[in-house]
């Protein structure tokens, strides 16, 4: 059936959308479950089995392939429970009448399905008369999953390394592939060739001769070149990318993958203009690859969806994404953290989010993945980290080890946010002959890392009153900068009415346009990079800064032409251009250190 909504709820953190499909899928809304934390999934599976009075048998770490089995079991349970809720809604009983009305009330007003329903029920709402029509016309939202491709830790049993297919991301992939879901796998954080090759092991990712794919592949990307490279890599294996999910490099929640100064508008323009070429060039590789595998290739180029997310905050921006860039869906993440009917966030953290202003939301270096990470000042996980530092015991006990990827000290890997790693790293630091200032800078870089793989899941446990003895009570939260403009807990209908322009939940009048906000974040990012480079100047760094600056300049020119009739927008762009021009002067002044003259000359 055709997609009902023009928005989707992206993955947020590890636990914030962990059961979102159960909450919103029955209303036709697509959402995404993170597959990082199988321990959390198992705890929630037990909880939902108890609530639903279903038999539960624990999948322990002593069992072979326990991670994949936990993921499969959880996904199948969520699907079954969501389908039960959906079937109850469609059954058109007196008890479900309010849910039916809610299903249709939140649809966009332009929806032909909504218009038909309103026509059918205009005179009177007769459940018996519309029962068959509901069964034929209502559809669930997709229960999608997300795998961060680089979070693919090697695993061991009794100090013996297991084969690659037991790595974390590989096991997560297998867990999804063997589930009953008919949905999409969203791959984020860049290309992992070994993981992409592993997709070939599962038939559900391949199309039949009519082009039907049970489990679709979605790539989260921040530029066209990355999409083309990854799409072609998978095509050579007979695998089709059904959707390219374009996310702002910096104006988003969670991890931020800065482009080389490419802004979202120009990136979307390129995707829009080259969409057909992208599909055709990839199909030319994809069809022969399928035939080499002895499979029948679909006769026609398969459809490609383009979706966009990152910083969207008003119905005008939403509509502009749809109408100007022809995207198929727009991702709304951060605001949904304030919608308990859609996401899972503990009460104390929700209160912090409601009160958060621009100064409280910042791009941090706390992620142990070494990638810039959006964070909220004063989150309880950071408070926990500060207490450990004050006790001269920096670092986390690392109870889950999902990002134990650094192999400087142990072949099996350590997380750089762990107490063990930071202790060893500080011992090394003590041996260096550094000034007090140099020591302080290096010390802070070591101890600032936070245990996000635990902190991003704990909120769900607290929200449901589950045991946090292993994890501790600290919560990490990763809203995008957009959170500053939302200041109340919202009902699902309220939030969706805001998306579709039927209401406005933003009371502030000073919210910048998403493109202006992104430009500001990129300018701040470039300024920080210039300051970092001043300490140690290399030809490579000067080239990077120059390229970054040139791309930002081109982006500003693109927006000036696009919004030529919007005076306020042009004024903001001029201010941004002025800041960039000053930075360009600083970059031009940078000089490579002169080589020392030889004593012989």
Image (spheres, rainbow, N blue to C red):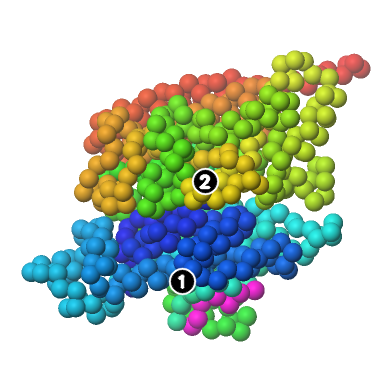
Along the horizontal axis of the image, is 265 left or right of 77?
A: left
| Closer-to-camera residue (90/199) | 90
**241 versus 441 height, above or below:** below
Question: At 29% across and 31% down in the image, what residue appears?
Answer: 508
Q: Which of 212 and 597 is in front in this view?
A: 212
Mark number displayed over residue 462: 2
| Mark 2–mark 1 CB contact (< 8 Å) | no
Tag 1, which secondary structure? Answer: helix
Vertical comparison of 251 with 430: above or below: below
Relative to 212, residue 530 above or below: above
Decide whether residue 208 is among the magenta residues: yes
Quadrant location of the C terminus?
Answer: top right
Q: Residues within 10 Å of mark 2 (few under 14, many from 20)?
A: many
Spatial CA span between label 2 and label 1:
25 Å
- Image quadrant for the N terminus? bottom left
**Which quadrant would residue 364 be assigned to in this image?**
top right
Q: Which of 45 and 218 is in front in this view?
A: 45
State the residue at coordinates (47%, 32%). 361
In the rendered image, residue 545, in percent from the top left (x then y), is placed at: 57, 32
Residue bearing mark 1: 80
> Residue 246: x, y in percent?
46, 52
Residue 479 is situated, as x and y percent measured from the top left of the image, at 46, 40
The local crowd at label 1, few if under 14, some if 14 to 19, many if 20 or more residues have their Cα within 10 Å, is some
Towards the viewer: 424 or 395: 395
Badge nearest the viewer, 2 or 1 = 2
Residue drawn at x 45%, y 81% is 210
Q: Where is residue 448 in the image (x, y as percent from the top left)?
A: 65, 31
């Amino acid at each position: 059936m055709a997609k009902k909504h023009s928005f989707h709820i992206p993955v947020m953190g590890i636990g914030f959308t962990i059961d979102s499909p159960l909450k919103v899928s029955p209303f036709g809304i697509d959402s995404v479950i993170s597959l990082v934390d199988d321990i959390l999934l198992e705890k929630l599976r037990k909880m939902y089995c108890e609530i639903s009075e279903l038999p539960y048998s624990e999948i322990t770490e002593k069992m072979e392939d326990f991670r994949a089995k936990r993921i499969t079991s959880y996904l199948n349970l969520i699907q079954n429970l969501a389908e039960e809720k959906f079937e109850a809604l469609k059954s058109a009983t007196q008890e479900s009448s309010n849910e039916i009305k809610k299903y249709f009330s939140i649809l966009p007003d332009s929806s032909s399905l909504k218009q038909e329903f309103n026509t059918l029920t205009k005179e009177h709402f007769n459940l018996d008369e519309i029962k068959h029509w509901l069964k034929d016309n209502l559809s669930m939202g997709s229960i999608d999953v997300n795998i961060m491709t680089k979070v693919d830790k090697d695993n061991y049993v009794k100090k013996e390394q297991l084969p690659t297919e037991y790595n974390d991301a590989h096991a997560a992939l297998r867990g999804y592939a063997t589930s009953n879901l008919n949905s999409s796998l969203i791959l984020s954080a860049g290309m992992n060739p070994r993981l992409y090759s592993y997709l070939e092991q599962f038939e559900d990712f391949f199309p039949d001769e009519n082009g039907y794919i049970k489990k679709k592949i979605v790539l989260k990307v921040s530029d066209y070149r990355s999409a083309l490279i990854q799409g072609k890599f998978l095509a050579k294996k007979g695998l089709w990318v059904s959707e390219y999910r374009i996310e702002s490099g910096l104006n988003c929640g969670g991890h931020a993958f800065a482009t080389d100064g490419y802004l979202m508008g120009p990136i979307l323009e390129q995707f829009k203009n080259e969409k057909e070429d992208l599909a055709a060039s990839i199909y030319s590789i994809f069809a022969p690859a399928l035939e080499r595998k002895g499979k029948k290739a679909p006769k026609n180029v398969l459809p490609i969806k383009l979706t966009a997310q990152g910083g969207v905050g008003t119905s005008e921006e939403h509509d502009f994404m749809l109408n100007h860039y022809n995207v198929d869906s727009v991702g709304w993440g951060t605001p949904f953290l304030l919608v308990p009917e859609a996401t899972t966030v503990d009460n104390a953290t929700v209160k912090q989010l409601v009160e958060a202003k621009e100064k409280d939301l910042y791009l941090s270096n706390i992620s142990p993945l070494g990638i810039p990470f959006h964070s909220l000042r004063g989150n309880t996980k950071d408070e926990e980290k500060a207490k450990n530092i004050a006790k001269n015991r920096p670092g986390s006990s690392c109870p889950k080890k999902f990002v134990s990827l650094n192999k400087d000290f142990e072949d099996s890997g350590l997380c750089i946010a762990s107490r063990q790693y930071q202790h060893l790293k500080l011992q090394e630091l003590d041996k260096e002959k550094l000034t007090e200032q140099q020591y302080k800078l290096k010390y802070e870089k070591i101890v600032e890392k936070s245990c996000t793989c635990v902190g991003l899941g704990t909120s769900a446990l607290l929200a449901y009153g589950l045991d946090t003895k292993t994890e501790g009570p600290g919560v990490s939260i990763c809203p995008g900068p957009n959170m500053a403009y939302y200041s109340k807990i919202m009902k699902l209908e309220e939030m969706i009415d805001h998306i579709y322009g039927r209401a406005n939940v933003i009371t502030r009048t000073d919210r910048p346009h998403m493109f202006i906000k992104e430009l500001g974040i990129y300018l701040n990012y470039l300024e920080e990079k210039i300051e970092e480079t001043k300490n140690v100047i290399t030809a490579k760094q000067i080239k990077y800064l120059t390229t970054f600056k040139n791309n930002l300049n081109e982006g500003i020119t693109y927006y000036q032409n696009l919004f030529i009739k919007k005076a306020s927008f042009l004024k903001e762009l001029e201010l941004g251009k002025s800041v960039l021009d000053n930075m360009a002067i600083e970059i031009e002044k940078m000089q490579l250190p002169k080589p020392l003259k030889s004593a012989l000359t």
